[in-house]
């Protein structure tokens, strides 16, 4: 087993932390296994295999298995604008890329344009990012209500795109730490070693790993970690 690894970040004057990070990513992968039935679309498998060029009905269907609860009919009216904005975002761009500030701000503006095209007509930041993460998994995190609360993102008075952008920014701050990036890499390699390269989780991006562990290390879920002797 790997040693105890911790990621930390600053939230106001408070320092937040997640202990046993590598272990928690491993347990997440085991707790939410890929179905044996290949006919069942698995979210993290589809994140690898989908067509990254445009949003299609299957993407929304797969996101709905992940509790996105967003009907295809709500996406259809904006598909032209969504796919046009998506085409401006390189699939290789990463949320944790070390970039000059002006380049990051340019990329952020392009992501915001995508969010503004998608998050309308009843599509919120949670369902929107669950679909769009599939298209750009290195860059766009899943910003559901659990993650938004965990990162203390302000929702009152903000639009859905603004909340999603703020969530991205907070996760970027965490992932840009050299120490935290090293822990993310260790977590990825450890799970790949256990589950093998054929596992969808072995190909999860750093964004997905961080997002998933922060999601699982909250409230109701966190109270079970002491049973494993971790906290």
Image (cartoon, grey):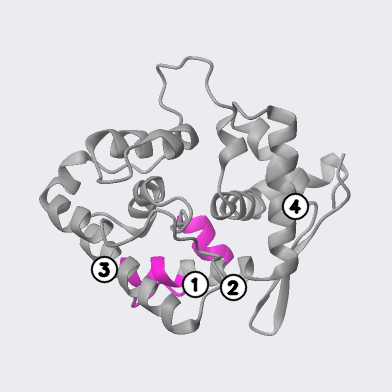
Q: CA distance from mark 2 to mark 3?
A: 21 Å
Is 136 or 229 nearer to us in this picture? Answer: 136
- Please check the rendered image and state whether residue 13 is part of the magenta-colored stretch, yes or no: no
- As displayed, is residue 20 above or below residue 45? below
Residue at the far left in the pictured view = 77
| Spot occupied by residue 1 in the image (x, y as percentages of width and height) | 87, 39
N-term-proximal mark, 4 vs 1 = 4
The residue wearing badge 1 is 169
Q: Is residue 8 visible?
A: no
Q: Which residue is mark 2?
A: 173
What is the secondary structure assignment of the residue under circle 2? helix
Q: Within 10 angstroms of label 3, few (less than 14), some, or many (20 or more) residues? A: some
Mark 4–mark 2 contact, CB under 8 Å? no
Q: Which mark is residue 226?
A: none
Distance between the Cα atoms at labels 4 and 2?
Answer: 17 Å
> Which structural element holds mark 1?
helix
Q: Which residue is mark 4?
A: 21
Give the residues drawn in magenta, as a range: 144-166
Mark 4 or mark 3: which comes first in sequence?
4
x 19%, y 47%: residue:
75
Assess whether mark 1 and mark 4 are in contact (beta carbons under 8 angstroms).
Answer: no
Q: Secondary structure at mark 3?
A: helix
Question: Circles 4 and 3: CB distance less than 8 Å?
Answer: no
Circle 3 residue = 113
């Amino acid at each position: 087993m790997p040693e105890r690894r911790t990621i930390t970040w600053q939230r106001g004057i408070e320092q937040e932390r997640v202990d046993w990070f590598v272990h928690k990513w491993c347990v997440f992968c085991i707790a939410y296994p890929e179905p044996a039935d290949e006919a069942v679309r698995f979210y993290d498998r589809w994140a690898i295999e989908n067509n990254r060029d445009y949003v299609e009905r299957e993407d929304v269907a797969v996101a709905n298995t992940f509790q996105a609860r967003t009907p295809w009919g709500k996406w259809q009216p904006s598909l032209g604008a969504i796919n046009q904005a998506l085409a401006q975002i390189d699939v290789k761009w990463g949320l944790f890329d070390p970039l000059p500030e002006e380049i990051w701000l340019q990329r952020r503006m392009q992501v915001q344009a995508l969010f503004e095209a998608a998050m309308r007509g009843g599509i919120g930041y949670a369902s929107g990012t669950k679909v769009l993460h599939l298209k750009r998994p290195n860059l766009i995190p899943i910003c559901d209500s659990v993650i938004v609360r965990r990162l203390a993102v302000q929702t009152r008075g903000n639009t859905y795109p603004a909340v999603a952008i703020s969530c991205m920014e907070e996760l970027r701050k965490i992932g840009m730490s050299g120490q935290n990036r090293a822990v993310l890499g260790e977590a990825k390699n450890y799970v790949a070693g256990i589950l093998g390269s054929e596992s969808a989780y072995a190909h999860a991006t750093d964004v997905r790993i961080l997002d998933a562990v922060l999601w699982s290390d909250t409230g109701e879920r966190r109270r079970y970690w002491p049973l494993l002797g971790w906290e």
